Amino acid sequence: MECFYCKGKLEDKLTNFTVDLGTSVIIVKGVPSQVCMQCGEVSYSDEVAQKLEKIVEKMKEVMTEIAVVQYEDALKVA
Ligand SMILES: [Zn+2]
């Protein structure tokens, strides 16, 4: 696989996914992703992107100002 933007090489890596909702911030740690070794662009597989969406929806219900969750733990409740 190559980078959508620069055609650089993609590397499988665990990254942190951050969503800024304006009044609150959700951080999901340890998300399986592909990172471009050239430009640093982070992308997710469709499966992971869908799961992240679910996690974010779930977190919104219990939101305080900042929520930090581990991806693997969040999957169990999402
Ligand atoms: Zn790139």
Image: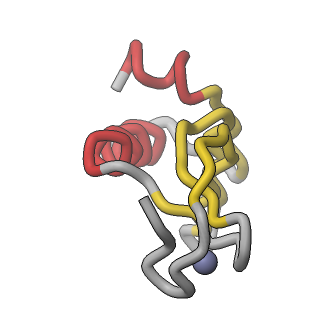
The foreground one among 30 and 36 is 36
User: In the rendered view, would you say 19 is above or below 55?
Assistant: below
The foreground one among 28 and 3 is 3
| Residue in the image at 72% along x and 49% along y | 66
| Residue in the image at 27% along x and 50% along y | 46
Give coordinates of residue 3: x percent, y percent.
Answer: 50, 73
| Residue in the image at 42% along x and 59% along y | 1
Give coordinates of residue 18: x percent, y percent.
Answer: 64, 57
User: Which residue is most to the bottom?
Assistant: 6
* Quarter of the rendering occupied by the C terminus: top left
| Residue in the image at 49% along x and 61% along y | 43
Give coordinates of residue 31: x percent, y percent.
Answer: 57, 38
Q: Quadrant of residue 15?
A: top right
Q: Quadrant of ligand 1?
A: bottom right
Marks counted in the figure total: 0
User: In the rendered view, would you say 73 is above or below 44?
Assistant: above
Q: Quadrant of residue 61?
A: top left
